[in-house]
Amino acid sequence: MCTLENRGNIFILTLTGHGEHRLSPDLIDSVLSALREVKSKATRGSVLVTTSQGKFFSNGFDLAWAKATGSSTKAVERLRHMTVSFKPVVAEMISLPMPTVAAIQGHAAAAGFLLALCHDYILMRSDKGVLYMSEVDLGLPLADYFAALFRAKLHSVTARRDVLLRGGKVKGMEAVRMGIVDAACNSEGSLAEAAMHLGEDLASRKWNGDAYKEIRMSLFPDLCGVLGLGEGNIAAKL
């Protein structure tokens, strides 16, 4: 599932175990609960770092669970259920009152890629792991908020084409060149060190979390509209 650890001002959300971290209903609920706990405990200077154990960051929705019914109709219903259930996770990430950092330890595919993309900063390994949107290969359409997040975060039309319409499997240094991630690290240890260093640097700024959240949301009005996030008013809080 996932764990939440607090090191000073830094919250560390870890997808635990050595499986694929498939976003099943249980894992989605666990992540959502952790994010809401982070939000409730946020103070000036808080930062979230999200990472994982094992070879995967997250390999997307739990398709095996969806197919376990033995019925194609029920499988589609389960997939739709996960898609709907994951939307609040994205909304929580975009409205979290603190800087956020994703440390992609391994493969991040489909909804797992989306989870990483929700963060303000993304670091990944250059020696292992790829970013991959499998929908075009699986013959699945993008949910509205999937598309909105990619429009908001990937400004390059070419990058969006290669990721979404070609199903490209993007490695670390290529992801940096495409503007998807901020840096690629050459080992698990260097990734963890870089993520914590960045988190500590951001925490040292002691920003007002509500102001930070409102600025982030103002940058992505279309995405916030799709997610149902209204415009906030921080005037009384400053």
Image: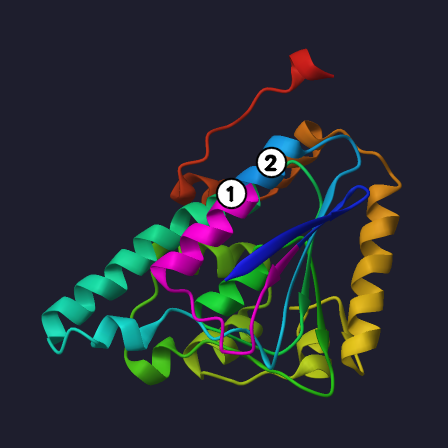
> Does label 2 or label 1 sit earlier along the sequence?
2
Name the image quarter holding residue 175: bottom right
Closer to the camera, 187 or 154? Answer: 187
| Mark 2 and mark 1: Cα distance apart in space | 9 Å
Mark identifier at residue 92: 1
Rendering coords of residue 112 (x, y %) = 50, 68
Q: How many marks?
A: 2
Rendering coords of residue 147 (x, y %) = 42, 60
Q: Which residues are magenta?
A: 13-35
Verify CB contact (< 8 Å) between mark 2 and mark 1: yes
Residue at 18 percent of width and 62 percent of height = 77
Closer to the camera, 98 or 227? Answer: 98
Q: Is residue 48 above or below residue 137?
A: above
Circle 1: residue type: Glu
**Which SS class for mark 1?**
helix
Circle 2: residue type: Lys
> Which residue is denoted by mark 2 in the rendering?
39
Q: Indicate how the structure is coloured in the image.
A: rainbow
User: Is 10 left or right of 231, judged from the image as shown?
Assistant: right
Residue 165 in the magenta stretch? The answer is no
Q: Quadrant of the C terminus?
A: top right
Residue at 13 percent of width and 67 percent of height = 74
Rendering coords of residue 101 (x, y %) = 70, 56
